[in-house]
Image (cartoon, rainbow, N blue to C red):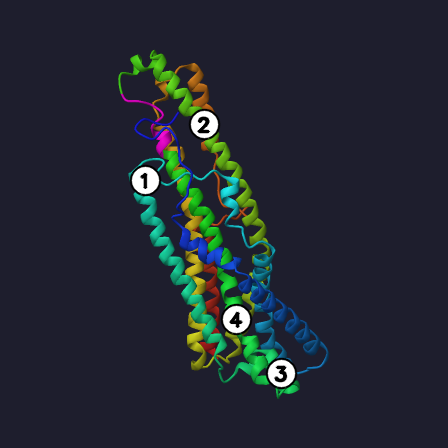
Amino acid sequence: MNPRGRNSIINPMTDDCLNVVKFISSDILQFKLIKICFWISLAIHIITNLIQIYFLTSVYDNRNEIILYAAVFFSEFYPMLAIGLILYDNQKVSHLKDELYLWAINSAGEKIASKIRKEANYLSLYCIMTCLTAVGASVLFVMDLPHDLEWFFVLRFLQDYLPEQFTVLALLYKTTFFFTGYSMIVHALQVIYYTQHLRYQIMMLNEYIMDLSDDGDDEELFHDKHYQSKVEKKLKFCIKRWDAYLAAYKNKVSEISNMIIGFSLSGWLLGISVVIVMLSGKITPEYYPRQAAVGLAATLTFCCLIESCQTIETQMQQMALVINKVKWYTFNKNNQKLYLILCMNLMVERKIQFSEKYSINYQLGLAIVRGIYSIGTIFGNMNLSS
């Protein structure tokens, strides 16, 4: 059934080449202590935000204070949503193996296995750097800075109403930043894990598609019953594999789309928060390392997420090129029909799409970068004019 020169049995994946990414984005969430900490963090932020809503709408009447505290308030929705999804299902990564029979990376030969290992190592290193950057940013948020009372309503509330317990409660509140910071990158890492494993499976299937036809005299191959029998088995094998892949792919894209809708709304509020901070004029040099660390972590996460989704789109396009190189004219009529079915399935354009117009790819990434640049230019001109 399998192409020539390869094992007759395709082994299942046992050694995960992305086990580092899996540990960072999923395995670490299975520890009970970590789950408890996330529950506590979520509860603290929900309670403090409810208190903030009450005081800013019913007690405080200083407009400037309300605007400054609103910056942190709007930024809270993104990590709270992220933590909520973590607690709702912290084994999303593990579901992939249940939905698709994952081949061992050497199933299509050592050459493609070596390429996959190399790419997986680079990706793992990148994800480690992203995670460490997020942890570093969290540490900087835990540290006390001169104007934190002007930004974090909770700290102001504790100082005014619970001064004796301020030190302990403020430390407890700030400790939650380790978990909110991690939650803001973990789902992107999960998407990266999904997409790259799916891409590796396509890369191996590509090798099988390239071996559909044999080299030799075209006329002799056309009349060779043994050759036609092998081709039929190979074609059916590739069609079944692609159907199984698409089922898992559509399911994952659906999950990712649902996540992105929520994150888009909360990200919009996070964007408002950034705008308020930039317009406030309250960013002093002491805050530069904190802002830089947050910006770096966000940039690393964004770039890797866009790249990983673009690569799977590119890999699917590559399949359409590979199938066109098959010597289909050496197939008999029955095999040509099977080949046509495979072609029709492979040539449908597929993307990591979360709406009718938008997909996670370079085009979206460029549009976002242009938007950020435009906003930054406007703020820069406002500062120069003032």
Residue neighbourhood size for the residue with mark 4, other residues' Cα within 10 Å, grouped as few (<14), some (14–19), many (≥20): many
Element type at mark 4:
helix
**Extreme-left residue of the structure:** 216
In the image, 182: left or right of 321?
A: right
> Which residue matches tag 3?
158
> Which residue matches tag 4?
177
- Depth check, mark 2 against mark 1: the one in front is 1
Which badge, 2 or 4, comes first in the chain's sequence? 4
Kind of residue indicated by mark 4: Phe
**212 falls in the magenta region:** yes
- Is there any visible trace of residue 88 in the rendered image? yes
Residue beneath the point at 66% across and 85% down: 161
Label 3 to label 2: alpha-carbon separation: 65 Å
Asked if marks 3 and 1 touch (Cβ < 8 Å), the reply is no
Residue beneath the point at 40% across and 47% down: 16
Which badge, 3 or 2, comes first in the chain's sequence? 3
Residue beneath the point at 37% across and 20% down: 230
- Quadrant of residue 290 within the rendered picture: bottom left
Which badge, 2 or 1, comes first in the chain's sequence? 1
**Extreme-top residue of the structure:** 223
Element type at mark 3:
helix
Kind of residue indicated by mark 3: Leu
> Which residue matches tag 1?
112
Label 2 to label 4: alpha-carbon separation: 50 Å
The span shown in magenta is: 207-215
Query: What x and y, as percent, mark residue 190?
Result: 48, 53
- Depth check, mark 2 against mark 4: the one in front is 4
Element type at mark 2:
helix
Residue neighbourhood size for the residue with mark 3, other residues' Cα within 10 Å, grouped as few (<14), some (14–19), many (≥20): some
Label 2 to label 1: alpha-carbon separation: 22 Å
**Extreme-right residue of the structure:** 58
